[in-house]
Amino acid sequence: MHITKDLVAASATPLVLGILAEGESYGYAILKQVNELSGGHLEWTDGLLYPLLHRLERLGHVEATWHTPVEGRRRKYYRITDQGLKELAEQRRQWAAVVDTLRGVWNAGTALRPIPAPAWGVTG
Amino acid sequence: MTVDSGSDLEKQIAEWRAYMRRRRELHQPDAEELEDHLRDRIAELTAAGLHSDEAFLIAVKRMGSLDELSREFAREHSERLWKQLVLTGDDTGTPAAGARRDLLIMIAFAVGAALAFKVPALFGVDISDNSGGDFYLRNFGLFALAPLAAYFAWRRRVSPGVLGVLAALFALGAVAANAYPTAIESQTAVLAAIHLPIALWLVVGVAYAGGEWRSDRRRMDFIRFTGEWLIYFVLIALGGGVLTAFTVNIFSAIGLDAETFVGSWLVPCGAMAAVVVAAWLVEAKQSVIENMAPVLTRVFTPLFTVTLLVLLGAIAWTSNGIDVDRDVLIIFDLLLVVVLGLLLYAISARDPAARPGIFDKLQLALVLSALVIDVLVLAAITGRITEFGFTANKTAALGENIVLLANLSWSAWLFLGFIRGRLPFGRLEQWQTRYLVVYAAWAWIVVLAFPPLFGFA
Protein backbone atom coordinates (compact mmCIF):
# COMPACT_ATOMS: atom_id res chain seq x y z
CA MET A 1 0.00 0.00 0.00
CA HIS A 2 1.31 3.42 -0.89
CA ILE A 3 0.15 6.46 1.10
CA THR A 4 -0.05 9.63 -0.97
CA LYS A 5 2.35 12.52 -0.48
CA ASP A 6 -0.36 14.89 0.80
CA LEU A 7 -1.40 12.55 3.57
CA VAL A 8 2.19 11.90 4.57
CA ALA A 9 2.85 15.64 4.75
CA ALA A 10 -0.32 16.36 6.72
CA SER A 11 0.35 13.69 9.31
CA ALA A 12 4.06 14.46 9.75
CA THR A 13 3.77 17.14 12.46
CA PRO A 14 1.39 15.26 14.80
CA LEU A 15 3.43 12.08 14.33
CA VAL A 16 6.72 13.72 15.24
CA LEU A 17 5.20 15.61 18.17
CA GLY A 18 3.48 12.44 19.36
CA ILE A 19 6.71 10.46 19.27
CA LEU A 20 8.60 13.22 21.08
CA ALA A 21 5.86 13.39 23.71
CA GLU A 22 7.04 9.90 24.73
CA GLY A 23 10.51 11.26 25.42
CA GLU A 24 13.59 12.92 23.97
CA SER A 25 14.74 11.45 20.67
CA TYR A 26 16.82 12.11 17.53
CA GLY A 27 16.08 12.13 13.83
CA TYR A 28 16.99 8.60 12.88
CA ALA A 29 15.20 7.07 15.87
CA ILE A 30 12.07 9.10 15.11
CA LEU A 31 12.05 7.83 11.54
CA LYS A 32 12.47 4.23 12.66
CA GLN A 33 9.60 4.62 15.08
CA VAL A 34 7.34 6.08 12.41
CA ASN A 35 8.25 3.16 10.19
CA GLU A 36 7.47 0.59 12.86
CA LEU A 37 4.25 2.23 14.01
CA SER A 38 2.91 2.41 10.47
CA GLY A 39 3.96 -1.15 9.63
CA GLY A 40 6.18 0.28 6.90
CA HIS A 41 3.31 1.99 5.07
CA LEU A 42 4.38 5.57 5.81
CA GLU A 43 7.40 6.17 3.61
CA TRP A 44 9.28 9.36 4.40
CA THR A 45 12.20 10.69 2.46
CA ASP A 46 14.76 10.52 5.26
CA GLY A 47 16.28 13.95 4.78
CA LEU A 48 13.00 15.85 4.78
CA LEU A 49 12.43 15.04 8.44
CA TYR A 50 15.12 17.55 9.39
CA PRO A 51 13.62 20.72 7.89
CA LEU A 52 10.40 19.73 9.66
CA LEU A 53 12.21 19.32 12.99
CA HIS A 54 13.88 22.70 12.48
CA ARG A 55 10.54 24.31 11.77
CA LEU A 56 9.06 22.86 14.97
CA GLU A 57 12.11 24.15 16.80
CA ARG A 58 11.70 27.64 15.39
CA LEU A 59 8.03 27.67 16.35
CA GLY A 60 9.00 26.65 19.88
CA HIS A 61 7.20 23.28 19.82
CA VAL A 62 10.44 21.39 20.41
CA GLU A 63 13.86 22.18 21.88
CA ALA A 64 17.11 20.78 20.55
CA THR A 65 20.39 19.99 22.26
CA TRP A 66 23.59 18.41 21.02
CA HIS A 67 24.78 15.49 23.12
CA THR A 68 28.33 14.24 22.79
CA PRO A 69 28.93 10.79 24.18
CA VAL A 70 32.33 9.98 25.66
CA GLU A 71 33.24 8.14 22.50
CA GLY A 72 31.36 8.38 19.29
CA ARG A 73 29.92 11.26 17.34
CA ARG A 74 27.76 14.02 18.65
CA ARG A 75 24.07 13.88 17.95
CA LYS A 76 21.21 16.38 18.02
CA TYR A 77 18.37 15.42 20.34
CA TYR A 78 14.91 16.94 20.27
CA ARG A 79 12.58 17.36 23.25
CA ILE A 80 8.97 18.52 23.21
CA THR A 81 8.09 21.76 25.04
CA ASP A 82 4.91 22.65 26.93
CA GLN A 83 3.82 24.64 23.93
CA GLY A 84 4.50 21.58 21.76
CA LEU A 85 2.30 19.46 24.02
CA LYS A 86 -0.51 21.98 23.62
CA GLU A 87 -0.05 21.92 19.86
CA LEU A 88 -0.14 18.12 19.92
CA ALA A 89 -3.40 18.14 21.91
CA GLU A 90 -4.88 20.55 19.38
CA GLN A 91 -3.75 18.41 16.45
CA ARG A 92 -5.17 15.30 18.13
CA ARG A 93 -8.56 16.96 18.43
CA GLN A 94 -8.51 17.90 14.76
CA TRP A 95 -7.43 14.46 13.62
CA ALA A 96 -10.01 12.79 15.86
CA ALA A 97 -12.69 14.88 14.17
CA VAL A 98 -11.44 13.87 10.73
CA VAL A 99 -11.19 10.19 11.64
CA ASP A 100 -14.66 10.20 13.22
CA THR A 101 -16.15 11.75 10.12
CA LEU A 102 -14.47 9.22 7.88
CA ARG A 103 -15.56 6.35 10.10
CA GLY A 104 -19.11 7.63 9.94
CA VAL A 105 -18.92 7.55 6.17
CA TRP A 106 -17.36 4.05 5.98
CA ASN A 107 -19.81 2.55 8.52
CA ALA A 108 -22.82 4.09 6.88
CA GLY A 109 -21.80 1.96 3.88
CA THR A 110 -25.20 0.35 3.44
CA ALA A 111 -27.29 3.39 4.37
CA LEU A 112 -25.47 5.72 2.01
CA ARG A 113 -26.22 4.02 -1.27
CA PRO A 114 -25.89 6.14 -4.37
CA ILE A 115 -29.32 7.40 -5.35
CA PRO A 116 -30.38 5.40 -8.40
CA ALA A 117 -31.20 7.38 -11.49
CA PRO A 118 -34.90 7.26 -12.36
CA ALA A 119 -35.60 4.93 -15.23
CA TRP A 120 -37.49 7.07 -17.73
CA GLY A 121 -39.98 4.70 -19.17
CA VAL A 122 -37.41 2.07 -19.97
CA THR A 123 -38.90 -1.30 -19.53
CA GLY A 124 -36.89 -4.39 -19.08
CA MET B 1 30.50 2.97 15.64
CA THR B 2 29.18 -0.21 14.11
CA VAL B 3 30.24 0.35 10.52
CA ASP B 4 32.97 -2.17 9.79
CA SER B 5 33.59 -0.90 6.31
CA GLY B 6 36.99 0.69 6.66
CA SER B 7 38.44 3.43 4.58
CA ASP B 8 36.33 2.94 1.44
CA LEU B 9 33.12 3.84 3.17
CA GLU B 10 34.77 6.74 4.99
CA LYS B 11 35.98 8.05 1.65
CA GLN B 12 32.49 7.82 0.18
CA ILE B 13 30.99 9.59 3.16
CA ALA B 14 33.66 12.29 2.96
CA GLU B 15 32.79 12.85 -0.70
CA TRP B 16 29.11 13.06 0.14
CA ARG B 17 29.93 15.53 2.93
CA ALA B 18 32.00 17.70 0.59
CA TYR B 19 29.13 17.67 -1.88
CA MET B 20 26.75 18.88 0.81
CA ARG B 21 29.12 21.61 1.90
CA ARG B 22 28.72 23.26 -1.46
CA ARG B 23 25.09 23.94 -0.66
CA ARG B 24 24.84 27.30 1.05
CA GLU B 25 21.42 26.41 2.41
CA LEU B 26 22.94 23.69 4.55
CA HIS B 27 24.96 24.92 7.48
CA GLN B 28 27.67 22.91 9.19
CA PRO B 29 25.43 21.62 12.05
CA ASP B 30 22.73 20.57 9.57
CA ALA B 31 25.27 18.68 7.50
CA GLU B 32 26.52 17.04 10.66
CA GLU B 33 23.01 16.06 11.66
CA LEU B 34 22.35 14.55 8.24
CA GLU B 35 25.66 12.73 8.27
CA ASP B 36 24.80 11.22 11.65
CA HIS B 37 21.58 10.01 10.10
CA LEU B 38 23.38 8.60 7.07
CA ARG B 39 25.78 6.65 9.25
CA ASP B 40 22.92 5.23 11.33
CA ARG B 41 21.17 4.08 8.19
CA ILE B 42 24.34 2.50 6.79
CA ALA B 43 25.00 0.74 10.08
CA GLU B 44 21.51 -0.72 10.04
CA LEU B 45 21.76 -1.88 6.44
CA THR B 46 25.19 -3.49 6.87
CA ALA B 47 23.94 -5.21 10.01
CA ALA B 48 21.19 -6.66 7.84
CA GLY B 49 23.87 -8.18 5.63
CA LEU B 50 24.50 -5.62 2.88
CA HIS B 51 27.94 -4.65 1.65
CA SER B 52 29.08 -1.27 2.85
CA ASP B 53 29.02 0.30 -0.62
CA GLU B 54 25.51 -1.03 -1.29
CA ALA B 55 24.43 0.25 2.10
CA PHE B 56 25.93 3.64 1.29
CA LEU B 57 24.04 3.89 -2.01
CA ILE B 58 20.73 2.96 -0.44
CA ALA B 59 21.26 5.32 2.49
CA VAL B 60 22.04 8.23 0.17
CA LYS B 61 19.05 7.40 -1.99
CA ARG B 62 16.75 7.29 1.01
CA MET B 63 18.05 10.64 2.18
CA GLY B 64 16.35 12.15 -0.83
CA SER B 65 17.70 14.24 -3.68
CA LEU B 66 20.04 16.95 -2.53
CA ASP B 67 18.16 19.51 -4.63
CA GLU B 68 14.91 18.77 -2.91
CA LEU B 69 16.61 18.67 0.46
CA SER B 70 18.36 21.99 0.10
CA ARG B 71 15.18 23.56 -1.23
CA GLU B 72 13.34 22.46 1.90
CA PHE B 73 16.16 23.74 4.07
CA ALA B 74 16.14 27.04 2.23
CA ARG B 75 12.40 27.32 2.71
CA GLU B 76 12.74 26.75 6.44
CA HIS B 77 15.91 28.81 6.96
CA SER B 78 15.20 31.68 4.66
CA GLU B 79 17.41 33.96 6.76
CA ARG B 80 20.37 32.07 5.33
CA LEU B 81 19.49 32.46 1.74
CA TRP B 82 16.56 34.69 1.34
CA LYS B 83 17.19 35.19 -2.31
CA GLN B 84 15.73 31.73 -2.71
CA LEU B 85 12.60 33.60 -3.72
CA VAL B 86 14.48 34.25 -6.94
CA LEU B 87 14.21 30.50 -7.56
CA THR B 88 10.70 31.05 -8.82
CA GLY B 89 12.01 33.40 -11.50
CA ASP B 90 15.20 32.04 -12.99
CA ASP B 91 15.13 28.31 -12.50
CA THR B 92 15.00 27.85 -16.23
CA GLY B 93 17.83 28.08 -18.68
CA THR B 94 21.53 28.21 -18.03
CA PRO B 95 22.59 30.53 -15.21
CA ALA B 96 24.66 32.80 -17.44
CA ALA B 97 21.95 33.29 -20.05
CA GLY B 98 19.37 33.76 -17.28
CA ALA B 99 21.44 36.44 -15.57
CA ARG B 100 21.98 38.25 -18.84
CA ARG B 101 18.31 38.22 -19.68
CA ASP B 102 17.47 39.42 -16.15
CA LEU B 103 19.89 42.28 -16.56
CA LEU B 104 18.33 43.35 -19.84
CA ILE B 105 14.84 43.21 -18.41
CA MET B 106 15.89 45.17 -15.34
CA ILE B 107 17.38 47.83 -17.62
CA ALA B 108 14.14 47.94 -19.57
CA PHE B 109 12.16 48.55 -16.38
CA ALA B 110 14.64 51.17 -15.13
CA VAL B 111 14.52 53.05 -18.44
CA GLY B 112 10.75 52.78 -18.36
CA ALA B 113 10.70 54.27 -14.85
CA ALA B 114 12.95 57.14 -15.94
CA LEU B 115 10.90 57.93 -19.02
CA ALA B 116 7.56 57.60 -17.25
CA PHE B 117 8.66 60.45 -15.01
CA LYS B 118 8.91 62.72 -18.06
CA VAL B 119 5.60 61.69 -19.65
CA PRO B 120 3.63 64.47 -17.89
CA ALA B 121 6.10 66.94 -19.43
CA LEU B 122 4.62 66.07 -22.84
CA PHE B 123 1.35 67.49 -21.57
CA GLY B 124 2.97 70.69 -20.43
CA VAL B 125 3.52 69.80 -16.78
CA ASP B 126 6.88 71.34 -15.93
CA ILE B 127 8.61 70.27 -12.75
CA SER B 128 10.27 73.66 -12.37
CA ASP B 129 7.13 75.79 -12.34
CA ASN B 130 4.63 76.00 -9.50
CA SER B 131 1.73 73.84 -10.60
CA GLY B 132 4.06 71.25 -12.13
CA GLY B 133 6.11 71.04 -8.97
CA ASP B 134 2.88 70.60 -7.07
CA PHE B 135 1.87 67.70 -9.34
CA TYR B 136 5.21 65.94 -8.98
CA LEU B 137 5.29 66.39 -5.22
CA ARG B 138 1.90 64.72 -4.86
CA ASN B 139 2.66 61.86 -7.24
CA PHE B 140 6.29 61.27 -6.46
CA GLY B 141 5.57 57.98 -4.66
CA LEU B 142 3.61 56.65 -7.61
CA PHE B 143 6.32 57.49 -10.13
CA ALA B 144 9.00 55.90 -7.99
CA LEU B 145 7.22 52.74 -6.89
CA ALA B 146 4.81 51.73 -9.67
CA PRO B 147 7.71 50.60 -11.93
CA LEU B 148 9.26 48.72 -9.02
CA ALA B 149 5.99 46.91 -8.29
CA ALA B 150 5.66 46.10 -11.99
CA TYR B 151 9.22 44.78 -12.05
CA PHE B 152 8.55 42.43 -9.14
CA ALA B 153 5.18 41.41 -10.55
CA TRP B 154 7.06 40.34 -13.67
CA ARG B 155 9.94 38.69 -11.79
CA ARG B 156 7.65 36.64 -9.56
CA ARG B 157 5.16 35.87 -12.34
CA VAL B 158 2.29 36.83 -10.05
CA SER B 159 -1.18 35.52 -10.72
CA PRO B 160 -3.75 37.75 -12.48
CA GLY B 161 -5.64 38.11 -9.20
CA VAL B 162 -2.61 39.56 -7.41
CA LEU B 163 -1.90 41.76 -10.41
CA GLY B 164 -5.42 43.13 -10.13
CA VAL B 165 -4.97 43.90 -6.43
CA LEU B 166 -1.66 45.68 -7.10
CA ALA B 167 -3.17 47.76 -9.89
CA ALA B 168 -6.19 48.63 -7.75
CA LEU B 169 -4.04 49.78 -4.83
CA PHE B 170 -1.86 51.97 -7.04
CA ALA B 171 -4.97 53.41 -8.65
CA LEU B 172 -6.35 54.15 -5.19
CA GLY B 173 -3.09 55.93 -4.35
CA ALA B 174 -3.28 57.96 -7.55
CA VAL B 175 -6.87 59.01 -6.85
CA ALA B 176 -6.09 59.92 -3.23
CA ALA B 177 -3.08 61.98 -4.30
CA ASN B 178 -4.89 64.00 -6.95
CA ALA B 179 -8.62 64.02 -6.30
CA TYR B 180 -8.75 65.85 -2.96
CA PRO B 181 -9.07 69.62 -3.22
CA THR B 182 -6.06 70.26 -0.97
CA ALA B 183 -3.60 73.04 -1.61
CA ILE B 184 -0.05 71.69 -1.74
CA GLU B 185 1.01 74.00 1.11
CA SER B 186 -1.70 72.53 3.36
CA GLN B 187 -0.66 70.18 6.15
CA THR B 188 -2.84 67.30 4.93
CA ALA B 189 -1.39 67.42 1.41
CA VAL B 190 2.18 67.34 2.71
CA LEU B 191 1.30 64.50 5.08
CA ALA B 192 -0.30 62.55 2.24
CA ALA B 193 2.79 63.11 0.07
CA ILE B 194 4.96 61.69 2.86
CA HIS B 195 2.71 58.75 3.69
CA LEU B 196 1.78 57.66 0.17
CA PRO B 197 5.28 56.29 -0.55
CA ILE B 198 5.14 54.32 2.72
CA ALA B 199 1.75 52.85 1.86
CA LEU B 200 2.89 52.05 -1.68
CA TRP B 201 6.18 50.56 -0.50
CA LEU B 202 4.16 47.97 1.42
CA VAL B 203 2.14 47.36 -1.74
CA VAL B 204 5.47 46.70 -3.47
CA GLY B 205 5.95 44.15 -0.68
CA VAL B 206 2.92 42.24 -1.96
CA ALA B 207 4.53 42.07 -5.39
CA TYR B 208 7.91 41.19 -3.87
CA ALA B 209 6.34 38.25 -2.03
CA GLY B 210 4.81 37.11 -5.30
CA GLY B 211 1.35 37.46 -3.79
CA GLU B 212 2.23 35.30 -0.77
CA TRP B 213 1.95 38.34 1.46
CA ARG B 214 0.32 36.42 4.28
CA SER B 215 3.39 34.26 4.80
CA ASP B 216 5.52 35.36 7.76
CA ARG B 217 8.68 34.14 6.05
CA ARG B 218 8.00 36.15 2.91
CA ARG B 219 7.28 39.22 5.00
CA MET B 220 10.57 38.82 6.81
CA ASP B 221 12.26 38.49 3.43
CA PHE B 222 10.69 41.78 2.44
CA ILE B 223 11.95 43.46 5.63
CA ARG B 224 15.45 42.25 4.79
CA PHE B 225 15.02 43.42 1.25
CA THR B 226 13.94 46.88 2.45
CA GLY B 227 17.12 47.35 4.49
CA GLU B 228 19.45 46.19 1.73
CA TRP B 229 17.58 48.20 -0.87
CA LEU B 230 17.96 51.37 1.18
CA ILE B 231 21.72 50.81 1.44
CA TYR B 232 22.11 50.25 -2.30
CA PHE B 233 19.93 53.23 -3.04
CA VAL B 234 22.05 55.51 -0.82
CA LEU B 235 25.22 54.20 -2.47
CA ILE B 236 23.81 54.91 -5.91
CA ALA B 237 22.68 58.34 -4.77
CA LEU B 238 26.20 59.14 -3.55
CA GLY B 239 27.62 58.12 -6.90
CA GLY B 240 24.93 60.13 -8.62
CA GLY B 241 25.84 63.18 -6.54
CA VAL B 242 29.45 62.95 -7.70
CA LEU B 243 28.34 62.56 -11.32
CA THR B 244 26.04 65.58 -11.02
CA ALA B 245 28.73 67.78 -9.52
CA PHE B 246 31.15 66.87 -12.30
CA THR B 247 28.55 67.38 -15.01
CA VAL B 248 27.66 70.88 -13.85
CA ASN B 249 31.25 71.99 -13.35
CA ILE B 250 32.74 70.47 -16.49
CA PHE B 251 30.10 71.98 -18.72
CA SER B 252 30.33 75.37 -17.08
CA ALA B 253 34.09 75.23 -17.75
CA ILE B 254 33.36 75.18 -21.49
CA GLY B 255 30.75 77.86 -21.10
CA LEU B 256 27.62 75.69 -21.31
CA ASP B 257 24.94 75.71 -18.64
CA ALA B 258 24.03 72.12 -17.72
CA GLU B 259 21.91 73.01 -14.74
CA THR B 260 18.58 72.76 -16.52
CA PHE B 261 19.50 69.35 -17.88
CA VAL B 262 20.68 68.20 -14.48
CA GLY B 263 17.66 69.58 -12.63
CA SER B 264 14.92 68.36 -14.91
CA TRP B 265 16.47 65.21 -16.44
CA LEU B 266 19.54 63.75 -14.76
CA VAL B 267 18.51 63.94 -11.12
CA PRO B 268 14.78 63.05 -11.27
CA CYS B 269 15.05 60.39 -13.99
CA GLY B 270 18.19 58.96 -12.43
CA ALA B 271 16.49 58.67 -9.06
CA MET B 272 13.49 56.87 -10.56
CA ALA B 273 15.74 54.41 -12.41
CA ALA B 274 17.86 53.92 -9.28
CA VAL B 275 14.79 52.62 -7.41
CA VAL B 276 14.61 49.66 -9.80
CA VAL B 277 18.38 49.23 -10.15
CA ALA B 278 18.83 49.09 -6.37
CA ALA B 279 16.12 46.42 -6.12
CA TRP B 280 17.83 44.37 -8.81
CA LEU B 281 21.21 44.78 -7.11
CA VAL B 282 19.83 43.50 -3.82
CA GLU B 283 18.76 40.27 -5.49
CA ALA B 284 21.58 39.82 -7.96
CA LYS B 285 24.56 40.89 -5.87
CA GLN B 286 23.45 39.21 -2.70
CA SER B 287 26.80 37.60 -2.03
CA VAL B 288 28.87 40.70 -2.81
CA ILE B 289 27.97 42.76 0.22
CA GLU B 290 25.93 40.16 1.94
CA ASN B 291 23.47 41.61 4.41
CA MET B 292 24.92 45.02 5.16
CA ALA B 293 21.93 46.06 7.24
CA PRO B 294 22.61 43.53 10.03
CA VAL B 295 26.28 44.54 10.09
CA LEU B 296 25.38 48.20 10.54
CA THR B 297 22.90 47.13 13.21
CA ARG B 298 25.66 45.40 15.16
CA VAL B 299 27.77 48.54 15.01
CA PHE B 300 25.10 51.06 15.91
CA THR B 301 23.03 49.22 18.51
CA PRO B 302 25.63 49.68 21.28
CA LEU B 303 26.22 53.32 20.28
CA PHE B 304 22.54 54.21 20.29
CA THR B 305 22.01 52.38 23.58
CA VAL B 306 24.77 54.41 25.23
CA THR B 307 23.41 57.66 23.80
CA LEU B 308 19.90 57.00 25.06
CA LEU B 309 21.08 55.91 28.49
CA VAL B 310 23.18 59.07 28.79
CA LEU B 311 20.19 61.14 27.71
CA LEU B 312 18.03 59.48 30.36
CA GLY B 313 20.74 60.04 32.93
CA ALA B 314 20.96 63.70 31.94
CA ILE B 315 17.19 64.14 32.23
CA ALA B 316 17.23 62.59 35.69
CA TRP B 317 20.35 64.53 36.77
CA THR B 318 19.35 67.98 35.58
CA SER B 319 15.62 67.32 36.04
CA ASN B 320 15.14 69.28 32.81
CA GLY B 321 11.76 68.55 31.27
CA ILE B 322 11.58 67.94 27.55
CA ASP B 323 10.70 71.13 25.74
CA VAL B 324 7.92 69.98 23.49
CA ASP B 325 6.75 71.36 20.24
CA ARG B 326 5.84 69.55 17.05
CA ASP B 327 9.44 69.30 15.81
CA VAL B 328 10.49 67.58 19.00
CA LEU B 329 7.71 65.05 18.60
CA ILE B 330 8.88 64.34 15.05
CA ILE B 331 12.48 63.93 16.21
CA PHE B 332 11.35 61.38 18.76
CA ASP B 333 9.19 59.63 16.17
CA LEU B 334 12.31 59.31 14.04
CA LEU B 335 14.25 58.05 17.03
CA LEU B 336 11.66 55.31 17.51
CA VAL B 337 11.90 54.47 13.81
CA VAL B 338 15.68 54.11 14.15
CA VAL B 339 15.35 51.93 17.24
CA LEU B 340 12.74 49.82 15.49
CA GLY B 341 15.01 49.56 12.46
CA LEU B 342 17.91 48.39 14.63
CA LEU B 343 15.59 45.85 16.23
CA LEU B 344 14.19 44.64 12.90
CA TYR B 345 17.57 44.11 11.28
CA ALA B 346 18.94 42.40 14.34
CA ILE B 347 15.93 40.07 14.23
CA SER B 348 16.06 39.50 10.50
CA ALA B 349 19.65 38.25 10.52
CA ARG B 350 19.48 36.27 13.71
CA ASP B 351 19.48 32.50 13.72
CA PRO B 352 16.12 31.87 15.43
CA ALA B 353 17.45 28.75 17.14
CA ALA B 354 20.47 30.43 18.79
CA ARG B 355 20.39 30.94 22.55
CA PRO B 356 19.98 34.45 23.96
CA GLY B 357 23.32 36.24 24.24
CA ILE B 358 24.82 39.51 25.37
CA PHE B 359 23.79 41.29 22.17
CA ASP B 360 20.16 40.41 22.82
CA LYS B 361 20.38 41.99 26.27
CA LEU B 362 21.90 45.10 24.76
CA GLN B 363 19.06 45.20 22.26
CA LEU B 364 16.53 44.95 25.08
CA ALA B 365 18.27 47.80 26.92
CA LEU B 366 18.05 49.92 23.77
CA VAL B 367 14.34 49.25 23.33
CA LEU B 368 13.57 49.88 26.99
CA SER B 369 15.46 53.17 27.17
CA ALA B 370 13.75 54.36 23.98
CA LEU B 371 10.42 53.45 25.52
CA VAL B 372 11.08 55.36 28.74
CA ILE B 373 12.13 58.45 26.81
CA ASP B 374 9.12 58.20 24.57
CA VAL B 375 6.72 57.94 27.49
CA LEU B 376 8.22 61.18 28.85
CA VAL B 377 7.72 62.87 25.48
CA LEU B 378 4.17 61.60 25.17
CA ALA B 379 3.24 62.81 28.64
CA ALA B 380 4.55 66.27 27.74
CA ILE B 381 2.87 66.43 24.34
CA THR B 382 -0.53 65.32 25.64
CA GLY B 383 -0.56 68.40 27.84
CA ARG B 384 0.18 70.59 24.81
CA ILE B 385 -2.55 69.03 22.70
CA THR B 386 -5.23 69.35 25.36
CA GLU B 387 -4.19 73.00 25.57
CA PHE B 388 -4.10 73.89 21.85
CA GLY B 389 -6.28 71.23 20.22
CA PHE B 390 -5.55 68.83 17.34
CA THR B 391 -4.11 69.75 14.00
CA ALA B 392 -3.39 67.34 11.16
CA ASN B 393 0.34 67.47 11.81
CA LYS B 394 0.07 66.89 15.54
CA THR B 395 -2.40 64.05 15.08
CA ALA B 396 -0.17 62.37 12.52
CA ALA B 397 2.94 62.72 14.69
CA LEU B 398 1.06 61.47 17.72
CA GLY B 399 -0.51 58.57 15.80
CA GLU B 400 2.89 57.48 14.52
CA ASN B 401 4.28 57.69 17.99
CA ILE B 402 1.55 55.44 19.33
CA VAL B 403 1.90 52.92 16.50
CA LEU B 404 5.64 52.65 17.16
CA LEU B 405 5.25 52.68 20.92
CA ALA B 406 2.79 49.79 20.78
CA ASN B 407 5.17 47.79 18.61
CA LEU B 408 8.21 48.43 20.79
CA SER B 409 6.41 47.80 24.07
CA TRP B 410 5.18 44.40 23.00
CA SER B 411 8.59 43.66 21.41
CA ALA B 412 10.26 44.47 24.73
CA TRP B 413 7.87 42.10 26.49
CA LEU B 414 8.54 39.29 24.01
CA PHE B 415 12.26 39.99 24.14
CA LEU B 416 12.22 39.69 27.92
CA GLY B 417 10.40 36.37 27.63
CA PHE B 418 12.98 35.18 25.12
CA ILE B 419 15.98 36.21 27.23
CA ARG B 420 14.48 34.42 30.21
CA GLY B 421 14.06 31.36 28.02
CA ARG B 422 10.27 31.30 28.25
CA LEU B 423 9.39 32.22 24.69
CA PRO B 424 10.89 31.06 21.40
CA PHE B 425 12.56 33.74 19.29
CA GLY B 426 10.14 33.00 16.48
CA ARG B 427 7.41 34.77 18.44
CA LEU B 428 9.25 38.09 18.23
CA GLU B 429 9.81 37.58 14.53
CA GLN B 430 6.15 36.80 14.02
CA TRP B 431 5.08 39.90 15.94
CA GLN B 432 7.20 42.12 13.71
CA THR B 433 6.03 40.55 10.47
CA ARG B 434 2.37 40.66 11.48
CA TYR B 435 2.73 44.30 12.55
CA LEU B 436 3.51 45.34 8.96
CA VAL B 437 -0.24 45.44 8.39
CA VAL B 438 -0.57 48.13 11.05
CA TYR B 439 1.94 50.37 9.27
CA ALA B 440 0.07 49.87 6.02
CA ALA B 441 -3.24 50.68 7.67
CA TRP B 442 -1.90 53.82 9.33
CA ALA B 443 -0.23 55.10 6.15
CA TRP B 444 -3.44 54.61 4.16
CA ILE B 445 -5.49 56.33 6.89
CA VAL B 446 -3.25 59.41 6.68
CA VAL B 447 -3.45 59.40 2.88
CA LEU B 448 -7.17 58.71 2.54
CA ALA B 449 -8.90 59.88 5.71
CA PHE B 450 -6.87 62.83 6.95
CA PRO B 451 -7.69 65.38 4.23
CA PRO B 452 -11.49 65.11 4.69
CA LEU B 453 -11.12 64.75 8.49
CA PHE B 454 -9.21 68.02 8.76
CA GLY B 455 -11.25 69.87 6.19
CA PHE B 456 -8.50 69.77 3.51
CA ALA B 457 -6.49 72.22 5.61
Image (cartoon, coloured by chain):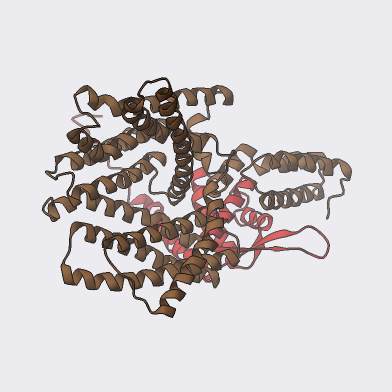
Chain colours: A red, B brown
Residue at image x 75%, y 59%?
Answer: A74
Horizontal side of A22 relative to B240 (left or right) equals right
Q: Is residue B380 above or below residue B46?
A: below
Residue at image x 19%, y 31%?
Answer: A120
Q: Is residue B274 above or below residue A67?
A: above
Residue A29's spot in the image, x, y percent? Answer: 68, 58
Residue B299: quarter of image? bottom right
Residue A60's spot in the image, x, y percent? Answer: 53, 63
Q: Please give the count of numbered marks on the rendered protein.
A: 0
Residue B135's spot in the image, x, y percent? Answer: 21, 36
Residue A42's spot in the image, x, y percent? Answer: 58, 49
Depth order, front residue of B49/B334: B334
Horizontal side of B398 relative to B15 (left or right) equals left
Q: Is residue B365 above or below residue A114?
A: below
Residue at image x 19%, y 35%?
Answer: B130
Horizontal side of A14 relative to B338 (left or right) equals right
Depth order, front residue of A92/B345: B345
Quarter holding the N terminus of chain B?
A: bottom right
Residue A75: quarter of image? bottom right
- Residue A103 is at least partly visible in this image: no
Residue B167: quarter of image? top left
- Residue A64 is at least partly visible in this image: yes
Q: Is residue B166 above or below residue A86?
A: above
Depth order, front residue of B328/B433: B328
Depth order, front residue of B79/B310: B310
